[in-house]
């Protein structure tokens, strides 16, 4: 199971602190490269085209490798200084891929940023476990992949997952409740977070304000919390595809927006339906970059379940 957001924030901060402190003593803790090759049979990762450590690629994306302990971290980053990250890998000491993570922008507004988070498990210790995919509000400043808004398209491919995002005007500024469903409409993950001044706030603050609710990212159905936010236990995907409508239930909270996201091809495409408080309904399509490593790993990813909780089923 994935770490919750608070734990991930602490881990990422500590990792950054360690790297910053040790890089001054050992320049080769960080290296930058132009290309990546992943063998789909052995899962061995090779990087090529060594780049300068400082200002490695001002105009193009690149791969940054950091070594420490028994594992190696590799990040596929956008142009230097852009804060774009397409993939983050963990590789073992022999160069074999263990995990891959994508954090992709799904929604942005005065409430902050909602991300689609995908973690693929390749290491033998995971026994080809299903991909952990869920939607959540998180802090704006983290590295992420932006979305490209495109026109209406019929080339979205197979449905992989469904999400509902409800945004409410409530202390400390906004409350954002997200539900992630598998492609059949079965609820898998709930996420409840808050924002103030346009950015995510620590879930400890939300828990203090709402002590009777479950907050953070939860890999289980919590009926009391789910019903508080008017989120359905199952999503009627067959009916919805025939006639889209707001499936959220009315609750005594000040609604800001309701959004249903249909995630296709492992979140390469998203159909985004937004339902306004005035009864309006708009549809947009989002597209994300397909990287060289995405193509190289596709034969393996095609065999892995997508859009399931980390343990493979709703708890």
Image (tube, grey):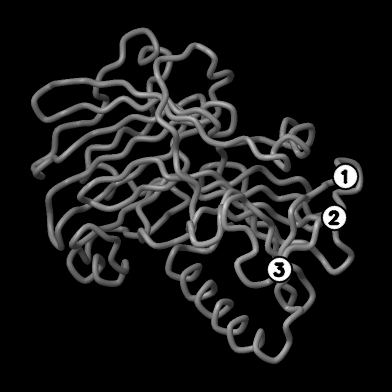
Tell us which disc is closer to us: 1 or 3. Answer: 3
- Seen at 31% across and 69% down, the residue is 202
Mark identifier at residue 39: 1
Mark identifier at residue 293: none
- Seen at 37% across and 12% down, the residue is 239
- Badge 2 marks a residue whose secondary structure is strand
Label 2 or label 3, whichever comes before in sequence order: 2
Displayed quadrant of residue 62: bottom right
Label 1 or label 3, whichever comes before in sequence order: 1
Q: Position of residue 112 (x, y in %)?
A: 28, 53
Kindly indicate whether the residue at mark 2 contacts the one at mark 1 (C-beta within 8 angstroms): yes
- Badge 1 marks a residue whose secondary structure is loop
With 235 as the anchor, is 209 left or right in this view? left
Name the residue that disc number 2 marks.
46
Placement of the N terminus among the 4 image quadrants: bottom right
Mark identifier at residue 52: 3
Q: Distance between the residues labelled 2 and 3?
A: 18 Å
- Local crowd size for mark 2, using a 10 Å CA cut-off: few (<14), some (14–19), many (≥20): few
With 20 as the anchor, is 218 left or right in this view? left
- Badge 3 marks a residue whose secondary structure is loop
Nearest the viewer among 161 and 93 is 93
Kindly indicate whether the residue at mark 3 contacts the one at mark 2 (C-beta within 8 angstroms): no
Tell us which disc is closer to us: 2 or 3. Answer: 3
Q: Position of residue 54 (x, y in %)?
A: 63, 72
Is 91 placed above or below 182 here?
below
């Amino acid at each position: 199971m994935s770490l919750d957001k608070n734990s991930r924030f602490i881990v990422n901060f500590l990792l950054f602190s360690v790297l910053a402190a040790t890089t001054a003593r050992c320049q080769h803790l960080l290296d930058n490269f132009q290309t990546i090759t992943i063998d789909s049979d052995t899962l061995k990762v090779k990087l090529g085209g060594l780049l300068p450590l400082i200002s490695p690629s001002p105009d193009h994306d690149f791969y940054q490798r950091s070594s420490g302990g028994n594992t190696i971290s590799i990040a596929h980053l956008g142009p230097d200084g852009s804060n774009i990250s397409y993939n983050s890998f963990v590789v073992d000491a022999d160069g074999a891929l263990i995990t891959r993570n994508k954090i992709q922008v799904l929604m942005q507004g005065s409430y902050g940023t909602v991300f689609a988070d995908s973690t693929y498990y390749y290491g033998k210790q995971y026994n080809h476990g299903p991909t952990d995919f869920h939607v959540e509000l998180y802090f704006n400043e983290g590295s992420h992949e932006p979305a490209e808004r495109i026109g209406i398209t019929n080339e979205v491919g197979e449905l992989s997952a469904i999400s509902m995002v409800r945004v409410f005007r409530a202390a400390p500024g906004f409350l954002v409740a997200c539900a992630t469903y598998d492609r059949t409409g079965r609820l898998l993950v709930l996420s409840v977070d808050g924002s103030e001044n346009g950015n995510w706030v620590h879930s400890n603050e939300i828990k203090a304000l709402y002590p009777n609710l479950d907050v953070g990212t939860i890999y289980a159905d919590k009926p009391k919390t789910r019903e508080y936010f008017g989120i359905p236990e199952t999503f009627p995907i067959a009916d919805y595809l025939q006639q889209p409508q707001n499936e959220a239930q009315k609750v005594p909270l000040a609604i800001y927006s309701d959004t249903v996201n249909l995630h296709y091809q492992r979140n390469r495409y998203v159909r985004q339906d937004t339902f306004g408080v005035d009864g309006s309904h708009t549809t947009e399509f989002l597209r994300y970059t397909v990287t060289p490593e995405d193509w190289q790993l596709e034969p393996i990813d095609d065999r892995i379940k997508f859009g399931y909780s980390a343990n493979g089923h709703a708890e």
